[in-house]
Amino acid sequence: HESNGDALVYVHEGIGEFMIAGVRHVLEANQSIVMPHNVPHRVKSLSYLKFALIVVFEQ
């Protein structure tokens, strides 16, 4: 899907696959990535996955 806000993802525990604009990123604990607004993305757990997601919207 897409979001109209930029999203910061921070992985607390586990391993996850983050597809952003067709590019695969595998993140582990203590790693982060930005998912830009209006760009297709998806998240897949590759193990137990605990992450924080902060989305910033323009006013």
Image (spheres, helix red, strand yellow):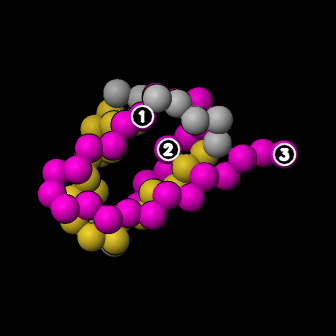
Name the amino acid, label 2. Answer: Met
Q: Nearer the viewer, residue 23 or 57?
A: 57
Q: CA distance from mark 1 to mark 3?
A: 23 Å
According to the picture, the residue beneath numbered tag 2 turns out to be 35
Name the amino acid, label 3. Answer: Gln
Is residue 32 on the magenta stretch? yes
Answer with the quarter of the image where residue 10 lies: bottom left
Query: Residue 14 at x, y = what percent?
Result: 22, 65
Left or right: where does residue 53 sit relative to residue 45? right
Is residue 35 on the magenta stretch? yes
Query: In which quadrant will I find the C terminus?
Result: top right
Asked if marks 2 and 3 touch (Cβ < 8 Å), the reply is no
The image shows residue 43, relative to residue 47, as above or below, that is above
According to the picture, the residue beneath numbered tag 1 turns out to be 41
Query: Mark 3, residues whose alpha carbon is within 10 Å: few (<14), some, or many (≥20)?
Result: few
Q: Nearer the viewer, residue 54 or 36?
A: 54
Of the residues under marks 2 and 3, which one precedes in the sequence? 2
Left or right: where does residue 30 sit relative to residue 33? left
Left or right: where does residue 12 sit relative to residue 56? left
Asked if marks 1 and 2 touch (Cβ < 8 Å), the reply is yes
Q: What numbered label is drawn on residue 59? A: 3
Mark nearer the viewer, 2 or 3 = 3
Residue range highlighted in magenta = 31-59
Name the amino acid, label 1. Answer: His
